[in-house]
Amino acid sequence: MSKNPSSNPSIESGDEDISRLNFIKVAVGGMCVAYAAAIGYPVFRYLNSPVSREAALASVKDVALAGADKLPLGAVLLFKFGPFPSMLIHHKDDSWVAFDSVCTHLGCTVQYHPELEKIVCACHGGQYDSHTGANISGPPPKPLTKFNVKVSPGTVTVTRA
Amino acid sequence: MSKIYEYLDERLSISDLKKFTEKKTVPNHKYSFWYYWGGISLLCFLIQLVTGILLMIYYKPGPDAYNSVRALTYDVDFGWLIRSAHSWSATIFLLSVFVHMFSVYFMKAYKKPREFGWWSGMALLILGLLFGFSGYLLPMDELSFTATKVGLAIPENIPVIGHAIASLMRGGLEVSEITVQRFFAWHAVVLPLLYLPLLMFHLWLVQKHGNAIPPSEEEVPFAQRKTIPFFPNFLMKDLAMWLFTLNVVAIMASLFPPDLGKMADPLGPAPVGIHPEWYFMSSFEMLKLLGKVITGTIGEAVGITIFTLGLVLWCLIPFYDVSSPKGLKGRRATYFGLFCLAVLLVTTLLGYLIG
């Protein structure tokens, strides 16, 4: 492939030097990128491993709470929907409701106050309606995520709405 | 780009560093190949730092040690690869450190004014071996458990204070999860804290005194000695060796990941055919052979005394070999080096052959 430039008048040696230099630059640069990717990809997957596992957990559509149908009136059951904290409330009027317990403001876990019929966030004083999950006071921008609840003998099934 | 360079150069004087590295030269002769082994050790050490930090993200010292390594190896994405790279890079690190040490020895690079380079290097080697010993226990499988029990029998044999030292290292009378916790503290905190400043000192000395030349090159008149600029010529070759080493680590780590044995059982018998890692094989085999000649704990004590004496002599060689390389002392030093190298190689081989 290496032609002597002086024996070939159609190629000027100067041009060829520049294209060789460019070729080396691109090849070395490309190899650096390839090495960075070959090292970076496994390291990213390694560090991201628990994240991808939790993401798989988070994609669950329903959770069955065995024995939760015995929950007394006005009581709350805290459970995990996938990786996230959630709550099942059995209201005094015998209605059932389930929410994601993560405050829509800055992510604190909220708390059910049966005497106020409210769900309250201790971090910044956010308040939600304990029947609908609607944000009624304080900084929360959105209502709590509400789940569907199905009560059957021996179990309560909570599903994503 | 040039504006950024200018900005940084005005404040950090990068061009001074560039000028300096261009002016700095490295001797070029037929033994120049041996100059790369210190750099290879350095690269492996850096790989150990990075992979070690990555392993620390999932590893749990103490009672959960085995299960955390199990999860790391089999459940975490690419965990097996990070662990394998750490293990292989450790092996190549110690191998290149040994090559580096012997090449320094035979080039007589320990002579004035480089004595402190030799001593700091020996200290780094001992720390490197302690890294290996402490790291080996961390997975807490059968093999590492037994190897640590055997290894701690060595300080145990030091007269009078041996038992106290070994017990302190173990954190008890037997190897247990307390030992793992201690070894982890040594492996991941204490040893790096000792190693890093010593390594800086070692590298500073190399920079200060430059590369030593072997005796054969010293005979060449000064004007006829060949050198190459450090930047970019030597650095490029050095980086090429780094790239080669990186590829070797990557290939070995991908193709031959280390096993994880059964969980250590304090009541279980030692596994059949147990032997230490290759870098402790020589001393293991020497103790075994000596034990056949001088039986009982006296044999061990004699063996440990011989090792210690040999190591002390090895460290003190700059005081002995002060004359010209062709002089009697210079030749004796070379023979002593060859003898030590032969003993190391033969006993290591014997260890693998007769087990």
Image: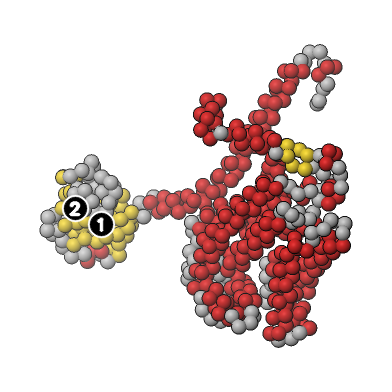
Q: Position of residue A97 (x, y in %)?
A: 21, 54
Residue B221, numbered circle? none
Q: Quadrant of the C terminus of chain B?
A: bottom right
Up-down relation of residue B298 to residue A21 (above or below):
below
Q: Position of residue B161 (x, y in %)?
A: 59, 80
Q: Quadrant of residue B275?
A: bottom right
Q: Position of residue B235 (x, y in %)?
A: 69, 40
Residue A87, numbered circle? 1
Q: Quadrant of residue B351?
A: bottom right
Using residue A32 as the reference point, say whether residue A120 is left or right of it. Answer: left
Residue at the image position 55 percent from the left and 80 percent from the top: B164
Mark 1 and mark 2: Cα distance apart in space: 10 Å
Residue at the image position 68 percent from the left and 77 percent from the top: B272
The answer to whether mark 1 and mark 2 are in CB contact below 8 A is yes
Residue that sits furthest to the top in the current view = A9
**Between B120 and B60, the one nearer to me in the picture:** B120
Using residue B38 as the reference point, say whether residue A150 is left or right of it. Answer: left
Up-down relation of residue B299 to residue A130 (above or below):
below
Q: What's the amino acid at mark 1?
A: Met
Q: Earlier in the sequence, mark 1 or mark 2?
A: 1
Residue wearing tag 2: A119
Residue at the image position 51 percent from the left and 47 percent from the top: A44
Q: Position of residue B27 (x, y in %)?
A: 77, 43
User: Is residue A160 shown to the viewer in this render?
Assistant: yes
Up-down relation of residue B63 to residue B121 (above or below):
below
Q: What's the amino acid at mark 2?
A: Ile
